[in-house]
Image (cartoon, helix red, strand yellow):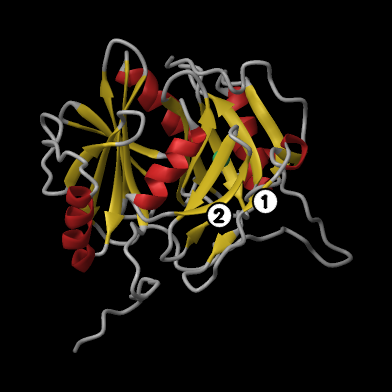
């Protein structure tokens, strides 16, 4: 067999059925031009493709999501990637659990399995390349030896371009129902949670500490999309750039406890957030991560500024 140069075999936990990646998100906003401006300034590669915007990260072939037009900002669907030889198993699982299969949304060309989750969110499981990382993502510190300048000059500082979509945080009416559904149906594992306030789930075939997380609310909706960068400097540079473009509301710089990532959240024009994230914990495919239940004090952030009043407000409710 010919080996493809640079191809890294996706990591896989043998003998267990579970999705491997959060393949794509889709949501709608009232004006896609506003979305294009916001996410381009955030450092993403946003293109118009027919009626939707496609969202990529620069230099990465994967399309992380699409944004369409609607009367107000609203979550559309999430597509999860699975290995090709697992699709029959997922189809049988849906059937045995009595979960009704649905048609793909109009205009979406797909041969994946579509259904609704515990909150009636539209979900797809489809065959896709593993876009979740196969090892802990590289994180660097710009540290120099004695006799050298360490900090970048403002005048020559580059733009921040995230490397990949890291995770999505969804509001849910019931965190325990979310845990049950996404572990039993999609085959994910619970990483950690804080009572019935928030829960973090990872993929069993090697993924970040969370690929998806759920926070309690009175309705479903997207709280934030998280984008991976390689240094704390890039978080700061990205945040400063967004302030310069008028997107000054947000939260950061700080460090989460569950997941451990350094963060800065930028509030988008619809009240939800985009997160610059660096150095999140990683759960390899052969690791049984010891899921914990932590009190609020030990589950949110280790350090950072005060949390904005509307940080957990669900503007989609
Ligand atoms: Fe996050």
Q: Percent from the top left, x then y, of residue 56?
A: 35, 44
Q: Residue furthest right?
A: 146
Residue 258 in sight in this render: yes
Residue 5 lies left or right of residue 176; in this view the side is left
Quadrant location, the N terminus:
bottom left
Left or right: where 246 falls relative to 71: right
- Which label's residue is closer to the chain start, 1 or 2? 2
Residue 165 on image: x %, y %: 44, 46
Q: Is residue 223 visible?
A: no
Q: Nearer the viewer, residue 277 or 44?
A: 277
Residue 131 position by quadrant: bottom left
Q: Ligand 1 sits in which quadrant?
A: top right
Q: How many marks?
A: 2
Mark 2 nearby-residue class (10 Å; few <14, some 14–19, many ≥20): many
Residue in the picture at 46% in, 28% down: 172
- In percent of width and height, residue 163 lies at 47, 52
Most extreme residue toward the bottom is: 1
Name the residue beneath numbered marker 2. 209
Q: Are marks 1 and 2 in contact (CB under 8 Å)?
A: yes
């Amino acid at each position: 067999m010919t080996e493809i140069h640079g191809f890294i075999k996706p990591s896989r936990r043998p003998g267990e059925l579970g999705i491997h990646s959060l393949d794509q998100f889709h949501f709608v906003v009232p004006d896609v031009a506003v979305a294009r401006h916001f996410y381009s300034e955030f450092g993403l590669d946003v293109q118009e493709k027919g009626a939707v915007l496609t969202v990529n990260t620069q230099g990465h072939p994967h399309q992380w999501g699409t944004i369409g037009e609607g009367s107000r900002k609203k979550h559309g669907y999430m597509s999860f990637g699975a290995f090709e030889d697992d699709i029959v198993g997922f189809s049988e699982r849906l059937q045995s659990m009595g979960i009704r299969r649905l048609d793909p949304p109009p205009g979406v060309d797909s041969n994946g399995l579509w259904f609704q989750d515990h909150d009636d969110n539209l979900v797809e499981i489809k065959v896709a390349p593993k876009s979740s990382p196969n090892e802990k993502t590289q994180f660097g510190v710009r540290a120099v030896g004695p006799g050298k300048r360490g900090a970048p000059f403002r005048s020559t500082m580059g733009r921040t371009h995230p490397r990949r979509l890291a995770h999505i945080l969804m509001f849910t009416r019931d965190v325990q129902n979310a845990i049950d559904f996404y572990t039993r149906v999609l085959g994910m594992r619970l990483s950690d949670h804080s009572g019935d306030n928030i829960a973090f789930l990872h993929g069993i075939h090697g993924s970040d500490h969370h690929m998806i997380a759920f926070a309690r609310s009175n309705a479903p909706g997207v709280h934030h999309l998280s984008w991976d960068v390689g240094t704390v400097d890039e978080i700061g540079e990205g945040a400063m750039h967004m302030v310069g473009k008028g997107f000054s509301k947000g939260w950061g710089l700080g460090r989460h406890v569950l997941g451990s990532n350094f963060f800065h959240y930028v509030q988008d024009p619809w009240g939800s957030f985009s997160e610059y994230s660096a150095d999140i914990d990683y759960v390899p495919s052969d690791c049984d991560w010891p899921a914990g239940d932590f009190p609020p004090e030990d589950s949110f952030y280790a350090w950072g500024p005060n949390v904005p009043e509307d940080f957990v407000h669900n503007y989609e409710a």
